[in-house]
Each structure stands twice: as structure tokens, then as C-alpha cells.
């Protein structure tokens, strides 16, 4: 897993390599200092040779300064490597998300994807930025200092053969128990993010229904869960330091005990013991660094597993069966199509749906709430894949079209209208980036956007704000329709996208679509019969099945479900 994670460092690998080189060299120069100090004490101080003391002192100072410069370099290069790795992981995840189908996104919660792109990446990024130095420095100092310690006094160094296994066992116990806790902690972060996202997205509903107190309680529950998971994980991780200190102080006491005895018996000099203790502290510090690195790696591995889940998720919809073809006319056919959102679901959302729509034809789709109207049209541009049966465009299965070309040829205005931050013109040109102002204005005339655009503060250059908060629901719908028209698609699908538009404006919009875009296939999903009664044909859906197909007059004459819908809406209008 670590190799895969670090493979996303890309061009920043050179900084990681430079950081490792700096750390290694820094460790060597730091390890020279105790040797020089031992000579200074045992030779210079013992003989009273001031020139020797000054020479050794200057050498120690030079080593310390070089180690300081190398330490600064390693910190800088580690930070660059960490930031580069974080950027690479975020980019890889985000790029993979762009290839997800709706069902792939449904597999993860949106809040969880946000956490994986931010918090989980930050954990790994920080581990590299702050952990690369101890990760390299610890083993180098451990091996080198242990070797020098054995060369100074092999008998005294045998104490490490007891201390190291004890420390390793304690670290193993802590890490094996704390790793699953970190995974649960990140899942708790997902929950808190979901609660915040839902609240901010539906803030108007929350305030309109006076549900602020309920939302506060819900957040407190999620926040308390995160706090408890974090406390449990960090409480166990905090045992790392006491375990380290226990081993460290026990080792120092053992060395002082046995070293003092060896000095009394003449087997060891005071300078040698002083130098030996310096290396002992280096060894114990390196062990502390290694233990901290293990703790950071434990949390990073938990985050890395979550990141790789996003990267390894196989898109349900691919171009593996695609040919180099384009949509020419926009004729659509459903041939015994069945669909359900999940393979394990017991019931189908769409059942044995078959119909044909000719190129340039205007077809309305109507049905009661929950009759799968929106699901039906999402199969045409392959936002979802049919479970059974075939969806065809111009007589060719949609699987054989490249997704980019298919979706360029089919413009869908979904129920949930979305505008992006930026100007009104920027939003319209999402449909066609290089559209001229003449093309933009023509699309706006068809969608009746020209009725209100001049009243906006800066016209086409008015900032929309996040989600288009400074325009009404009906205006937002018309802007989304204009954006879709600007693509000049072969097929235009309006999924209940005029529900917030008044009937007079809707009538003008339908007339403009019919007159200005006669060759474009148009599919209109609506709740109101008035929105589809002028269509060439109307498809009546009932509980995921095609109940009937015909004109408004034909259905009104023979179909009792259509009659019920018509009468209920007529009575509502009369009221």
C-alpha cells in the first residue's frame, strides 16, 4: 500500500530523495560530536592540553553547524515532498471521480468523498512532511550509534539486547490495537461532514420549518461520536510515550549501574562512560523517533486504505464497447429495458419498457410521483446503465457510443438545477465554451432568459454566487435550459425543468422550442399535463412500466389513469 501511495508523489520524488540525503548526512555529523567530546575529555582535559581542547571544540562546532544546515534542508525538502504527494493524491481521486457513474457515487456518500479528498489526504501529507526526517534519521542513528556503542564497550552495550525487544513488543501491542480505531475515527469524520453538508444545503428548509434545535442536537450526536472515537484512539496512541520513557529510563539506570561498577574496577574511563551515555541518548532518541513514525504510519495507512478505495473503484460505465461513431439524428428506442439501482435489490425500478421516439419528435413523459420518469431518461445518456434490455440511439446501442460524444449530443436539464459560482455568461458557456455572444443571446431568447437578464445588475456579467442564490427558481430553470440549448444537441431532455416557471412563460418556451429547433428531438418530463399536451406523443408511465402511449386527445379518451391525472389537475386549476 505504501508503495502505491508514494507513487503519486510524481515529480516531487526528487525532494524526498534530497530530504533523505540531508537527514542521513545530518545524522553522521551529529554522531561525530560524542566521539570528539570523548577525545576532548579523555585526552585534552586529562592532559591539560588547551590547543587540543580548542581544536576539538572547533571541530564539534563545525559538525554542529553543518548538521544544522542539513536539518533545515531536510525540513524544507520534506515539506515540499509532502505537499506534492498530497496534491497528487487529491488530483488522482478527483480525476477518478469524473469517470464515476451515478451508481459509483451512490456507493460512497458525498460527505465521505469530501473527507477522503481532504482530511485523509492531509493525514498522509503531514506524515510525509513531519515524518520523513525521523523515518530516515531514526534507523541511521540507531544502527550507527549502536555500532559505535558496541565498539566503545561491548559488555555495556548488551543492555540494548534486552531493551529493544521489550520496546518492540510494547509498540506492537499499541499499534495493533490503535489502527482499527483510526479507521473508525475517519468514518466518524464522514458522519459529521454529512450532517454539516445536509444542513447547509437545506438551510432554507431548516429555517422555514424552525428545525434549528433538531439540527443542533443531530450535530451534537455526530460530534460526540467523533469525540469519543478520537479520545479512544488517541488515548491508546498516547501510551507510546510512557512505554518509550519506561524503556529509556530503565536502560539509562542499567547503564549507570553497571558503568559505575566498571569505572570502580578500572575497566572503563569517565570520558568513555560520558561518550557512551551520549550514544545511549542518541539510540533512545532514535527509538522514540521510530516509534512516533510507526504511530503516524498507522494513521496514514488507515487514511491510505480509504483513498485507494476511491481510486480502485471500478466505474460501472466504461467505453470498452465503444466505437468511433457519433449521434447523427437523435432517434431513441427502448427495447425491453429493465433497471434497478443495485444488483441485490429485489424489485426493478423499470420493468420491460419498450417504445420508440423518432428524430425531431417531441415526446412528453408523464406519470404519478415515483413512476420512474427521471430514471428512464437517465439511461439515454448512460448516467445509469440498463440492467437488462437495450437503449438505442439512431438504432445503435448506447454502449457503442463513446460517452463523451453521446453526452455531447444529448443535453439533459435535470430536476435539480445547478448553477456554478461565476458570472451568468460563464454558466451559460458551460454548454459550449467557445459560444459567441450571438449564440448565447439566441439560446436565451428561446429559453425566455432575455425577459429578465437585462434587469440583473450587470446583465450577462452578473455574479451568480454559489448555487445561483441571487436568481429565482424559475429564472434558474430557464438559465439551465438555455445552457443546454447552447450545446446544440441532437436530443434535448427537460426533466420537470419548468416546474417553477409560470404557465404563460412555459407556453412561450414550448413554442420557441418547436419553431426554432424543429430538428431536435425533445423529451419533456412533467407533472402538469399542460406542459406535454402539445407533444407529438405522450408516454404514460405507471409504477415503472409503460401504461400507454398516444396523443393528449387519445389518452384522454381511452386511458383512465390519464383521465384521473387530468381531472385532478383541472379541479386544482378551478379551485
Image (cartoon, helix red, strand yellow):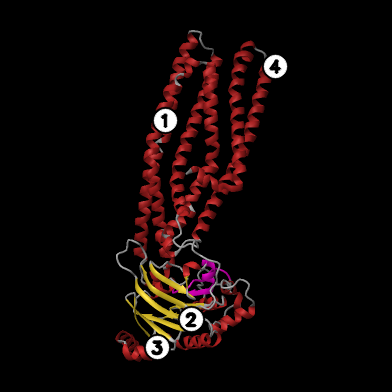
Secondary structure beneath label 3: loop
Nearer-N-terminus badge (3/2): 2
**Quarter location, residue 44:** top right
Q: Which mark is residue 51?
A: 4
Labels 1 & 4 near each other (Cβ < 8 A): no
Comparing labels 2 and 1, the label whose residue is closer to the camera = 2
Spatial CA span between label 3 and label 1: 79 Å
Q: How many marks?
A: 4
Residue on which the image places disc 2: 522
Q: Is residue 122 magenta?
A: no
Comparing labels 4 and 3, the label whose residue is closer to the camera = 3
Q: Which mark is residue 168?
A: 1
The range drawn in magenta is 402-422
Labels 4 & 3 near each other (Cβ < 8 A): no
Check disc 1: other Cα within 10 Å, few if <14, some if 14-19, many if 20+. few
Q: Between residues 102 and 519, which one lies in front from this camera angle?
A: 519
Q: Position of residue 236 (x, y in %)?
A: 38, 39
Q: Is residue 158 visible?
A: yes
Name above or below for residue 399 compared with residue 76. below
Spatial CA span between label 4 and label 3: 110 Å
Nearer-N-terminus badge (4/3): 4
Residue on which the image places disc 3: 551
Secondary structure beneath label 2: strand
Amino acid at each position: 500500500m505504501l508503495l502505491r501511495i508514494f507513487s503519486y508523489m510524481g515529480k516531487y520524488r526528487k525532494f524526498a530523495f534530497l530530504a533523505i540525503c540531508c537527514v542521513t548526512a545530518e545524522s553522521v555529523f551529529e554522531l561525530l560530536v560524542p566521539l570528539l567530546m570523548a577525545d576532548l575529555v579523555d585526552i585534552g582535559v586529562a592532559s591539560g592540553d588547551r590547543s587540543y581542547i580548542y581544536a576539538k571544540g572547533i571541530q564539534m562546532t563545525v559538525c554542529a553547524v553543518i548538521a544544522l544546515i542539513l536539518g533545515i534542508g531536510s525540513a524544507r525538502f520534506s515539506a515540499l515532498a509532502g505537499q506534492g504527494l498530497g496534491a497528487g493524491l487529491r488530483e488522482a481521486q478527483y480525476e477518478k471521480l469524473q469517470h464515476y457513474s451515478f451508481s459509483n457515487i451512490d456507493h460512497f456518500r458525498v460527505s465521505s468523498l469530501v473527507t477522503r479528498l481532504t482530511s485523509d489526504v492531509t493525514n498522509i501529507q503531514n506524515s510525509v512532511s513531519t515524518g520523513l526526517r525521523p523515518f530516515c534519521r531514526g534507523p541511521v542513528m540507531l544502527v550507527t550509534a549502536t555500532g559505535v556503542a558496541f565498539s566503545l564497550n561491548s559488555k555495556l552495550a548488551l543492555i540494548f539486547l534486552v531493551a529493544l525487544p521489550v520496546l518492540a513488543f510494547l509498540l506492537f501491542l499499541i499499534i495493533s490495537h490503535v489502527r482499527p480505531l483510526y479507521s473508525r475515527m475517519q468514518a466518524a469524520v464522514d458522519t459529521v461532514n454529512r450532517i454539516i453538508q445536509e444542513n447547509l444545503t437545506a438551510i432554507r428548509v431548516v429555517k422555514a420549518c424552525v428545525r434549528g434545535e433538531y439540527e443542533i442536537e443531530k450535530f451534537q450526536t455526530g460530534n460526540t461520536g467523533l469525540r469519543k472515537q478520537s479520545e479512544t484512539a488517541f488515548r491508546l496512541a498516547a501510551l507510546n510515550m510512557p512505554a518509550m520513557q519506561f524503556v529509556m529510563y530503565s536502560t539509562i539506570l542499567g547503564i549507570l549501574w553497571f558503568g559505575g561498577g566498571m569505572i570502580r574496577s578500572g575497566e572503563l574511563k569517565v570520558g568513555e562512560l560520558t561518550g557512551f551515555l551520549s550514544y545511549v541518548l542518541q539510540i533512545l532518541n532514535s527509538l522514540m523517533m521510530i516509534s512516533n513514525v510507526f504511530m503516524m504510519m498507522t494513521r496514514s495507512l488507515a487514511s491510505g486504505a480509504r483513498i485507494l478505495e476511491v481510486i480502485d473503484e471500478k466505474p460501472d460505465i466504461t467505453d470498452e464497447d465503444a466505437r468511433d461513431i457519433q449521434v447523427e439524428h437523435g432517434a431513441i428506442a427502448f427495447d425491453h429495458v429493465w433497471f434497478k439501482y443495485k444488483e441485490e435489490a429485489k424489485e426493478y425500478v423499470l420493468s420491460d419498457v419498450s417504445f420508440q421516439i423518432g428524430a425531431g419528435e417531441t415526446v412528453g413523459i408523464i406519470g404519478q410521483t415515483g413512476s420512474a420518469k427521471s430514471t428512464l431518461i437517465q439511461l439515454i445518456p448512460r448516467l445509469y446503465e440498463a440492467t437488462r434490455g437495450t437503449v438505442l440511439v439512431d438504432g445503435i446501442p448506447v454502449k457503442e457510443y463513446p460517452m463523451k460524444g453521446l453526452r455531447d449530443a444529448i443535453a439533459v436539464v435535470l430536476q435539480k438545477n445547478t448553477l456554478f459560482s461565476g458570472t451568468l455568461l460563464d454558466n451559460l458557456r458551460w454548454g459550449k465554451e467557445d459560444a459567441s455572444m450571438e449564440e448565447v443571446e439566441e439560446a436565451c431568447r428561446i429559453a425566455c432568459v432575455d425577459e429578465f437578464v437585462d434587469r440583473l445588475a450587470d446583465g450577462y456579467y452578473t455574479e451568480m454566487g454559489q448555487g445561483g442564490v441571487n436568481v429565482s427558481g424559475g429564472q434558474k430553470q430557464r438559465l439551465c435550459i438555455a445552457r443546454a440549448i447552447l450545446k446544440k444537441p441532437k436530443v434535448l431532455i427537460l426533466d420537470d425543468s419548468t416546474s417553477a416557471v409560470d404557465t404563460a412563460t412555459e407556453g412561450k418556451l414550448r413554442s420557441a422550442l418547436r419553431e426554432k429547433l424543429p430538428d431536435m428531438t425533445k423529451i419533456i418530463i412533467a407533472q402538469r399535463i399542460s406542459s406535454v399536451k402539445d407533444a407529438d406523443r405522450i408516454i404514460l408511465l405507471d409504477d415503472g412500466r409503460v401504461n400507454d402511449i398516444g396523443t393528449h386527445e387519445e389518452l384522454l379518451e381511452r386511458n383512465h389513469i390519464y383521465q384521473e391525472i387530468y381531472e385532478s389537475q383541472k379541479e386544482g386549476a378551478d379551485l
